[in-house]
Image (cartoon, rainbow, N blue to C red):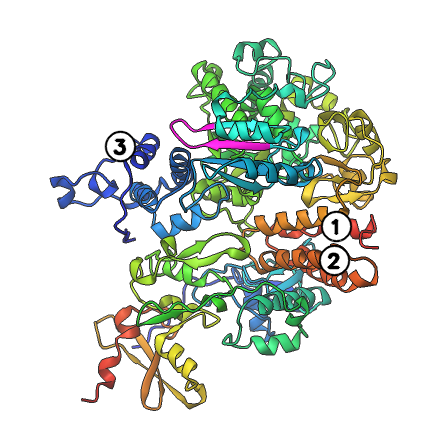
């Protein structure tokens, strides 16, 4: 590899931002001044290239400090990491939170996704754009994971350190305040306000949310923390996997794969090292349960990851956290640092001779990176494009090594499995969907938030708990990749088998209620826009199909009956190819919600 | 002496292809098996000298037990597999993929695609006159080759050939996302400001003519490009001692482009700037 650089130089700030991440450069080959020694031998090679995974953190460092990524800054980062500038440019342009063009230091991300649109995001956007001058860049974007407080806005002001402020529910005045003075914006309400059941002693997963101090390891331990890990060390790795398998736990991210089987498959791989990856890139519109867990009970994830890694023979774990969750990032960083300082992470966890540590990697605005293999590429410093399977992650995952990847909620379920034992856990819920489940309820309800219920509760029960408002027109299950159901289908049991039988999906547990405020065709158009924006562009069905889907929905947004029939037929054909021929779940599900709206709700009739 | 590389002997495995039992060497792809059995499965992004990217999805087939269709180009054949290549479901996806591509990309110089569009009864026009197209202008920023990204189907072959699979120059990458994704050098600059070494190995693998010799581009623009009047002569490059094979494409007694046979066991179709573009001295008649 012969790196080629232009003449652009980094500014002092850009250099400082990169050096703060990577340390000072050691030779002119890495961007320092040239010394005599540099003239006599070259540095680089495999050792330098092995740091490729620091590319995404490096891009964040530049963007956080300056607000955008200049040519000089990008070149300097490339020199430091021995990455070809063309590749780094390809990676940087992949993520919505980065800009390769100059822009103001402050960016106000305004959510225009489903829940926020129904709560007046359009007026909010118009209002802030009218009030804010050229000093703030207003960016309309997909779900910010604050649906219980819609409409939502997130202000990010670049600098050292970067400042963030969340405004939700946002009024024009508050959003403008957050953008112009992020430091003096009011503190967000505690995480527990997003969990209306908080404090209920019956809760299994949310039991500590709003009860413990999320910054205190001692408080966590006083509320049952780290008993599961001790139990894990008693059981040994094989024993832990047996418990998890017997519990019937399946993945909560949407695919519902049996967790025990995944762990067993990874643990038995002869290739080493093994990796553990926690998928906290919660980007499905309407989903915010991982955020509430991370903000309200961050040590639970640290403990659960330690158990999962111990069981599968991993010594290094990564949390891939979506970039739009600043408070979850702060709390998790703090929890990991405290756990490390107290010997709950590190070379000798709990004096058991087992080494494990966790690193957080921030996403940068790409829904596709929630796809398990796209997430690996993103961590490794490549474009977040899904890989083709097989080989599956349990065999070749992160850095090409056997990897277990689990969602936050899945991992947190491991704690009660070990503390109460597999049989007691499996007794919760139904025979095929065991355990408690988190539902993200938002939209047309009085008390939106994350609800914990045993599997088997019906859709009606969940909606009743959240106080569904009169005039219910439709419910979206599973988010943009899920499907709509009618208000007369409230007896659908919210289990994997129950939703499947009813011809819909549970997905990630989104329950979004709609009244007639926003016409259904507008919602479908927003869903189609979402998939068009978030398609990585790798495969043709998704890259072009999502565009054609949006175009057709645009044409029929005001039409019904025979006037829409041709385009609906076209949508069905494109949708079928999307589902059959796309590489990954994004394209395969991009037509689900639209199809369900046409077939179940009779949209356009 | 001619040495034929034999490699490690490979076991044969058996699976069902369109109802017939077929035997292929272990490690073969489903596409290899289809071709060995004489089946014409269309491909666009597949390259004989590159690892399968399975991006275009035009080669999808049905595999029993698989929820979705499977790209024949990258799926390794497994014993006992039941594969069907010509089902209504597979044909539907191929048809739609062809429609999606033809409605957004200029496929006028893509070999064979017109035949497939006819065979699969694809109707790219049905997305209407407003259907978004790439809308790119040809980039003529150097004397050797032209990048006409209006013809780009984003097969990644040029990126792979420029990167770790062959050239190790890494001058280009996919930039942007979704429908806006394009092949670009850093900062989307002209080629002359990039790491490009003008080996032309990207031109060699481009399946659509998005990358072409400047000479071919100019002749097409002038309406003088005529492949029926061209001869192809394979010879050995005279520049250095490696002995790369060159195929000289000659029209009206002028070399109009240079390719290299992909089955050459040393170079696999790759050349350097001299072999690829340094042929003017041959035609110097002064």
- The residue marked by circle 2 belongs to what chain? A
Q: CA distance from mark 2 to mark 1?
A: 8 Å
Residue B31 in the image: x percent, y percent?
56, 66
* Residue on which disc 1 sits: A521
The part of the image, by quadrant, that contains residue A98 is top left
Secondary-structure class at tag 3 = loop
Which range is magenta? Answer: A153-163
Q: Nearer the viewer, residue B232 or B280?
A: B280
Q: Nearer the viewer, residue A124 or A55?
A: A124
Secondary-structure class at tag 2 = loop
Residue A501 in the image: x percent, y percent?
82, 43
Label pair 2/1, CB-CB below 8 angstroms: yes
The part of the image, by quadrant, that contains residue A39 is top left
* Residue on which disc 2 sits: A556
Residue B242 part of the magenta-drawn span: no
Residue A161 part of the magenta-drawn span: yes
* Residue on which disc 3 sits: A24
Instruction: Name the residue furthest right.
Output: A488
Residue A55 in the image: x percent, y percent?
39, 41
């Amino acid at each position: 590899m012969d790196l080629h650089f232009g003449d652009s130089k980094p500014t002092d700030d850009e250099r400082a931002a990169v050096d703060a991440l990577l340390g000072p450069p050691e030779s002119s080959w890495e961007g320092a001044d040239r010394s005599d020694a540099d003239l006599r031998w070259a540095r680089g090679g495999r050792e330098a290239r092995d740091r490729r995974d620091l590319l995404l953190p490096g891009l964040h460092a530049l963007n956080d400090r300056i607000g955008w990524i200049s040519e000089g800054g990008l070149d300097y980062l490339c020199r430091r990491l021995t990455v070809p500038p063309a590749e780094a440019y390809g990676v940087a342009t992949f993520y919505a939170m980065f800009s390769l063009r100059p822009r103001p230091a402050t960016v106000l991300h305004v959510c225009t996704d489903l829940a926020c649109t129904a709560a007046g995001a359009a007026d909010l956007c118009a209002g802030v754009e009218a009030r804010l001058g050229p000093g703030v860049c207003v960016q309309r974007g997909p779900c910010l994971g604050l649906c219980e407080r819609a409409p939502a806005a997130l202000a990010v002001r670049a600098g050292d350190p970067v400042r963030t402020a969340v405004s939700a529910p946002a009024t024009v005045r508050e959003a403008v305040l957050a953008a112009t003075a992020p430091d003096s914006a009011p503190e967000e309400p505690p995480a527990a306000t997003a969990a209306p059941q908080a404090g209920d002693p019956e809760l299994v997963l949310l039991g500590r949310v709003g009860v413990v101090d999320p910054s205190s390891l001692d408080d966590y331990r006083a509320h049952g923390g780290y008993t599961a890990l001790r139990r894990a060390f008693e059981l040994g790795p094989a024993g832990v996997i047996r418990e998890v398998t017997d519990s019937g736990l399946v993945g909560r991210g949407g695919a519902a794969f049996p967790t025990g089987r995944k762990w067993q498959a990874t643990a038995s791989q002869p290739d080493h090292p093994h990796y553990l990856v926690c998928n906290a890139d919660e980007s499905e519109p309407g989903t915010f349960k991982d955020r509430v867990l991370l903000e309200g009970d961050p040590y639970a994830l640290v403990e659960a990851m330690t158990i999962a890694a111990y069981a599968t023979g991993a010594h290094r774990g990564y949390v891939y956290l979506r970039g739009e969750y600043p408070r979850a990032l702060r709390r998790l960083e703090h929890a990991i640092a405290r756990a490390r300082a107290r010997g709950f992470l590190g070379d000798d966890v709990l004096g058991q001779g087992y080494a494990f540590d966790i690193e957080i990697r921030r996403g940068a605005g790409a829904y596709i990176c929630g796809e398990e293999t796209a997430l690996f590429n993103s961590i490794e410093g490549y474009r977040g494009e899904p890989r083709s399977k097989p080989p599956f992650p349990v065999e070749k995952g992160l850095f090409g090594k056997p990897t277990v990847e689990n969602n936050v909620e899945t991992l947190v379920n491991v704690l009660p499995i070990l503390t109460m034992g597999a049989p007691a856990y499996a007794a919760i819920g139904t025979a095929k969907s065991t355990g408690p489940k988190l539902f993200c309820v938002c939209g047309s309800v009085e008390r939106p938030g994350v609800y914990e219920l045993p599997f088997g509760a019906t859709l009606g029960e969940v909606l009743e708990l959240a106080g569904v408002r009169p005039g219910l027109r439709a419910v979206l299950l599973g988010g943009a990749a899920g499907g709509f159901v009618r208000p007369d289908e409230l007896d659908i049991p919210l289990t994997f088998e129950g939703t499947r039988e009813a011809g819909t999906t549970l997905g990630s547990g989104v329950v979004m209620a709609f009244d007639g405020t926003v016409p259904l065709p507008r919602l479908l158009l927003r869903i189609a826009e979402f998939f068009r924006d978030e398609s990585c562009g790798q495969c043709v069905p998704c890259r072009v199909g999502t565009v054609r889907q949006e175009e057709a929905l645009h044409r029929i947004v005001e039409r019904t009956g025979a006037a829409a029939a041709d385009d609906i037929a076209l949508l069905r054909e494109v949708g079928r190819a999307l589902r059959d021929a796309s590489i990954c779940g994004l394209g395969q599900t991009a037509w689900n919600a639209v199809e369900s709206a046409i077939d179940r709700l009779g949209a356009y009739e | 002496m001619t040495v034929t590389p034999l490699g490690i002997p490979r076991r044969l495995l058996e699976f069902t292809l369109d109802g017939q039992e077929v035997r292929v060497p272990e490690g073969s792809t489903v596409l290899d098996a289809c071709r060995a059995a004489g089946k014409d499965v269309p491909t666009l992004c597949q390259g004989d000298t590159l690892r399968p990217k399975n991006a275009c999805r035009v080669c999808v087939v049905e595999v029993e037990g698989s929820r979705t269709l499977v790209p024949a180009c990258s799926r390794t054949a497994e014993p006992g597999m039941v594969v069907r290549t010509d089902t209504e479901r597979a044909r539907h996806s191929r048809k739609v993929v062809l429609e999606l591509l033809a409605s957004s990309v200029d496929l006028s110089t893509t070999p064979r695609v017109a035949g497939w569009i006819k065979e699969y009864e694809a109707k790219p026009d049905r997305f209407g006159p407003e259907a978004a197209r790439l809308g790119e202008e040809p980039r003529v920023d150097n004397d050797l080759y032209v990048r006409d990204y209006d013809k780009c189907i984003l097969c990644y072959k040029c990126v792979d050939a420029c990167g770790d699979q062959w050239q190790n120059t890494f001058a280009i990458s996919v930039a942007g996302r979704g429908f806006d994704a394009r092949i670009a050098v850093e900062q989307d600059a002209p080629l002359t400001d990039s790491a490009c070494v003008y080996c032309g190995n990207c031109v060699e693998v481009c399946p659509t003519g998005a990358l072409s010799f400047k000479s071919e581009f100019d002749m097409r623009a002038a309406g003088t490009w005529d492949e029926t009047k061209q001869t192809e002569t394979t010879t050995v490059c005279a520049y250095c001692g490696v002995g790369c094979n060159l195929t000289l494409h000659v029209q009206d007694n002028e070399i109009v482009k240079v390719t290299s046979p992909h089955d050459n066991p040393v170079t696999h179709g790759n050349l350097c700037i001299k072999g690829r573009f340094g042929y003017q001295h041959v035609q110097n008649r002064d």
